[in-house]
């Protein structure tokens, strides 16, 4: 235990007391003499039961204000819980999801807006944190497990960061299928070429001349067909598919209010958007039983031996 005052690790237990969040352990620093308590919720002044309820509601797709009305607390309290638990879930995912072995991986991006539309962001110079933001997802085809995720602009820099993270988490030879985003082939070959079977599946649409890019996000153009191109190795034809990760995109939109189109539920700040995604990914991987699998994706990938309750997720995230 590290002292909050002088950062010394020379501490000892100095009694404990009970409050509304449970039993709190107090410590005394042997260097500076200060005493401090260990708060399992990182300073959140709210009952643990309400924290669990807030996390459950957010994981089921409710917005911040709706959650605040149901739990009977301030919306900023909900955001504080989201920030604390979201940060811990990000660290939990980074700690547990390592050395993943799977036969096939599917990669796609999911669009959302933050702060304002991209058109207004360009006109008023809001900065890169506003406008279009894409969430990159890497999903195992068989276990439906989200191995890696990353949120940012759809550019080469964020694609590079995402694929580098994917390469660190998977082991052995891997088959990958992506869409036609131009940054994928060179980046994936750079990080995974020696153990890679890679194909691009690009969907073809009949897009009218006056069909602007923004309209495609709300009403897709008529589907014409697909084009498959092998980019590396010798991928199995029956595993060249992006349907599972696109179905996962629907799950993300359904269980996360911030991805709802044509509504006021979009994220106003990028860091809250990222916290919400981290919370969703951990709840999806470890808590939600997949209808096809009959278990959670983490159990299917043998990263857990049972479906976690939300209380257990919070407990493990706060360790």
Image (tube, grey):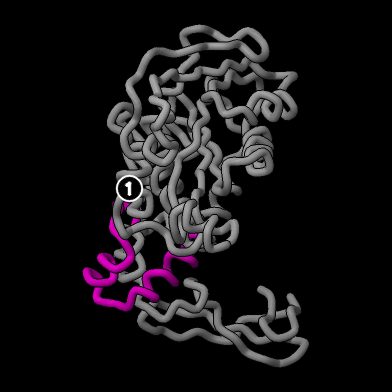
Q: Residue lying furthest front in this view? A: 210
Can residue 234 be seen here? The reply is: yes
Q: Tell me if 268 is positioned left or right of 60 in this view.
A: right
- Left or right: residue 71 versus residue 45 is left
User: Where the C terminus falls, by quadrant?
Assistant: bottom right
Residue at 53% x, 36% y is: 147
Q: How many marks?
A: 1
Q: Residue at image x 54%, y 52%? A: 92
Among the 4 quarters of the image, the one containing residue 8: bottom right
Magenta region, residue range:
57-86
The x and y percentages for residue 289 are 32, 38
> Is 1 above or below relative to 246?
below
Q: Quadrant of residue 36?
A: bottom right
Q: Main secondary structure of the magenta part?
A: helix
Q: Residue furthest left?
A: 70
Instruction: Report the front residue among 93 and 126.
Output: 126
Q: Residue at x 29, y 68 (%)?
A: 65
Q: Is residue 317 in sight in this rendering?
A: no
Residue bearing the label numbered 1: 261
Front-most of residues 277 and 47? 277
Q: Specify the farthest residue to the bottom.
A: 33
Residue 237, percent across and down? 50, 7
Q: Residues within 10 Å of mark 1 (few under 14, many from 20)?
A: some
Residue visible at 28% across and 71% down in the picture: 68
């Amino acid at each position: 235990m590290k002292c909050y005052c002088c950062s010394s690790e020379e501490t000892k237990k100095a009694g404990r007391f009970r409050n509304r969040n449970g039993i709190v352990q107090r410590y005394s620093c042997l260097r500076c003499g200060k005493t401090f308590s260990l708060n399992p919720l990182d300073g959140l002044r709210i009952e643990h039961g309400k924290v669990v309820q807030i996390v459950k509601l957010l994981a089921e797709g409710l917005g911040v204000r709706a959650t605040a009305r149901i739990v009977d607390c301030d919306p900023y309290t909900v955001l504080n819980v989201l920030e604390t638990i979201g940060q811990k879930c990000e660290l939990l995912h980074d700690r547990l999801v390592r050395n993943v072995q799977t036969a096939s991986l599917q990669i796609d991006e999911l669009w959302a807006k933050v702060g304002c539309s991209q058109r207004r962001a360009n006109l008023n110079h809001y900065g890169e944190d506003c406008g279009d933001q894409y969430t990159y997802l890497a999903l195992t085809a068989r276990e439906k497990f989200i191995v890696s995720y990353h949120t940012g602009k759809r550019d080469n820099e964020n694609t590079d960061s995402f694929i580098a993270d994917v390469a660190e988490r998977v082991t052995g030879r891997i088959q990958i299928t992506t869409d036609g985003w131009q940054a994928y082939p060179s980046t994936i070959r750079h990080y995974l070429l020696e153990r890679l079977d890679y194909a691009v599946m690009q969907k073809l649409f009949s897009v009218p001349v006056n069909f602007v890019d923004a309209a495609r996000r709300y009403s897709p153009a008529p589907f014409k067909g697909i084009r498959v191109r092998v980019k590396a190795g010798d991928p199995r034809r029956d595993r060249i598919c992006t349907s599972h990760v696109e179905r996962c995109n629907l799950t993300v939109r359904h269980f996360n209010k911030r991805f709802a189109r044509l509504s006021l539920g979009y994220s106003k700040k990028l860091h809250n958007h990222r916290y919400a995604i981290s919370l969703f990914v951990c709840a999806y991987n470890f808590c939600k039983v997949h209808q096809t699998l009959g278990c959670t994706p983490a159990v299917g990938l043998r990263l857990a031996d049972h479906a976690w309750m939300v209380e257990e997720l919070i407990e493990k995230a706060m360790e």
